[in-house]
Image (cartoon, rainbow, N blue to C red):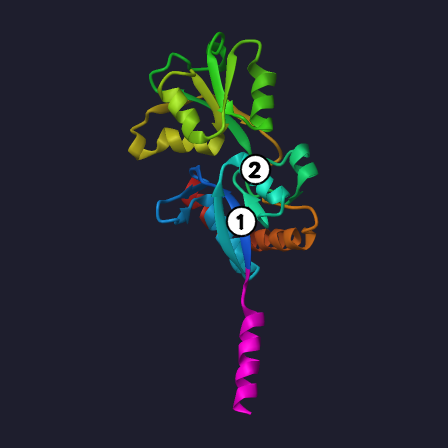
């Protein structure tokens, strides 16, 4: 009898265990996500995803990758979800199931503090660096190809290094990322913004493979709850106010 009771207890513990979601996340795009040497994850996207997982009673298992790898992992169902300042565009919506937008998505030009470039009018003949993903590449090509040369980089670190070493004169990156690098105390104001923000997509979303509609529905419900209970507002103020 005791054996049967123990068996039932073990079974109930097994079925009540929270599901684990494999989440592909960008390894280094502050303030959205950063992975430390001890495999500790932090940033706005991380805290938002942690809160979402708590709402849906799941455990987050983060997999740090680059942008192209993130999309590939989700598409090939090697990850359940992907998050990383992913702008919602028709192409992204075609390739994936996408959550409700959780933040506005904009691009921003940035340069070094001592650069003579102060506005878009100063871009003629200059080199513009940007991420080598379809959204940023198409935006730069559309707006600046007739006045400037364009160079593409796969990672944020490469972009910043190219700017610091004057391989490029300005970079186009996410607005929130640009503001982080212009305001960070540890950077001692090495960079400045150029011009106004540029609209990119219809906000940032969390992506899932096709066939995971039930999961995306749960994600959306959690996002709505986080906004309603004040969690989202607090998180937003912590990172962007």
Identify the secondary structure beneath mark 2: loop
Position above or below: 110 against 28? above
Residue at x 40% of width, y 33% of height: 180
- Residues rendered magenta in the picture: 1-19
Taking the image as drawn, is residue 241 in sight?
no
Count the marks: how many? Answer: 2
For label 2, the residue is 86
Residue 143, position in %: x, y?
58, 16
Count residues near mark 1 (Cα–Cα under 10 Å), then give few for <14, some for 14-19, many for 20+.
Answer: many
Residue 117, position in %: x, y?
42, 13
Separation of residues labelled 1 and 2 (CA atoms): 13 Å
Q: Quadrant of the C terminus?
A: top left
184 relative position to 105: left or right: left
Are dots 1 and 2 in contact, CB under 8 Å?
A: no
Between tags 1 and 2, which lies in front?
Answer: 1
Quarter where residue 178 is shown: top left
Magenta stretch, main secondary structure class? helix
Taking the image as drawn, is residue 169 in sight?
yes
Residue at x 50% of width, y 36% of height: 66
* 21 magenta-colored: no
Quarter where residue 52 is shown: bottom right
* 8 magenta-colored: yes
Residue at x 54% of width, y 30% of height: 106
For label 1, the residue is 23
Q: Nearer the viewer, residue 121 or 92?
A: 92
Position above or below: 41 against 153? below
Q: Nearer the viewer, residue 157 or 191?
A: 157
């Amino acid at each position: 009898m005791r054996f049967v009771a123990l068996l039932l207890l073990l079974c109930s513990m097994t079925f009540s265990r929270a599901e684990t979601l494999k989440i592909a996340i960008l390894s280094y795009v502050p303030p959205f996500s950063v992975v430390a040497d001890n495999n500790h994850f932090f940033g706005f996207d991380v805290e938002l995803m942690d809160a979402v997982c708590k709402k849906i009673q799941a455990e987050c298992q983060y997999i740090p990758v680059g942008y192209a790898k993130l999309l590939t992992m989700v598409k090939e169902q090697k990850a359940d979800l992907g998050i990383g300042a992913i702008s919602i565009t028709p192409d992204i919506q075609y390739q994936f199931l996408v959550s409700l937008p959780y933040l506005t998505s904009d691009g921003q030009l940035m340069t070094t503090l001592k650069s003579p470039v102060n506005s878009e009018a100063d871009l003629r003949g200059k080199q513009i660096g940007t991420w080598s993903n379809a959204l940023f590449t198409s935006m730069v090509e559309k707006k600046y190809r007739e006045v400037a040369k364009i160079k593409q980089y796969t990672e944020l670190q490469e972009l910043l290094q190219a700017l610091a070493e004057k391989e490029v004169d300005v970079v186009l990156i996410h607005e929130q990322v640009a503001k982080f690098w212009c305001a960070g105390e540890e950077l001692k104001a090495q960079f400045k913004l150029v011009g106004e923000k540029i609209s990119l997509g219809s906000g940032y979303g969390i992506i899932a493979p096709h066939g995971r509609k039930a999961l995306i529905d749960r994600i959306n419900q959690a996002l709505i709850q986080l906004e309603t209970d004040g969690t989202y507002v607090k998180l937003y103020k912590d990172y962007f106010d």
